[in-house]
Amino acid sequence: SSVTAAASTWDSMYHLQSATLDKAVTVKLTRTLAIIPITLVLSFFKLRKNKDGQKINLKKVFPFFIIYFVLASIITTVAIKMGVSADFFTPFKELSKFFIVLAMVAIGLNTNVIKLIKNGGKPIILGYICWICIACMSLFMQHLLGIW
């Protein structure tokens, strides 16, 4: 998402005809699709690495959301090729945004801050320092580019 946001900003700053954004989306989708073979290979090794001789359930090892992702991509592509308007998928896009926000909230609400602090203040401090450095660098680059 940050790749496409940066490309979109770049295109809007220089009034380009989406050349940068098109390439950024292609790179982002390629990286996203690379998750599929990596997950398959790691699942295969996890199934083979069982030292106790116990059977490992594929449902516990393989994240099936990847199959749903591929199916949704195929259905959308085929539907658009068959003439279904892209506007038809707008409610689904909004619903997916809602679910992503919901997942992030669930992760945040499930965080036990006291346990996090007890288990390691150093990682929290490192995360805070990284956050400050990234924010400062972002503001600096925006200033250099004349955005801010």
Image: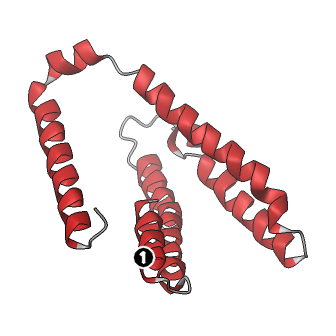
Which residue sits at x=24%, y=13%? 114
Q: In the shown orientation, is residue 38 left or right of residue 95?
A: left
Which residue sits at x=55%, y=82%? 18
Q: Quadrant of residue 76?
A: bottom right
Classify 145 as above or below 47. Answer: below
Residue type for callout 1:
Met
Give the residue furthest to the right. 83
Count of labels in the image: 1
Q: Secondary structure at mark 1?
A: helix
Disc 1: which residue: 13
> Residue 54: image x %, image y %?
47, 34
> Residue 24: image x %, image y %?
47, 76
Classify 4 as above or below 23. Answer: above
Q: In the shown orientation, is residue 121 left or right of residue 147?
A: left
The C terminus - image quarter:
bottom left
Which residue sits at x=17%, y=62%? 140
What crowding class fits label 1: few (fewer than 14 Cα within 10 Å), some (14-19), or many (20 or more)? few
Give the residue furthest to the left. 122
Q: Nearer the viewer, residue 33 or 145?
A: 145
> Residue 58: image x %, image y %?
57, 43
> Residue 37: image x %, image y %?
50, 65
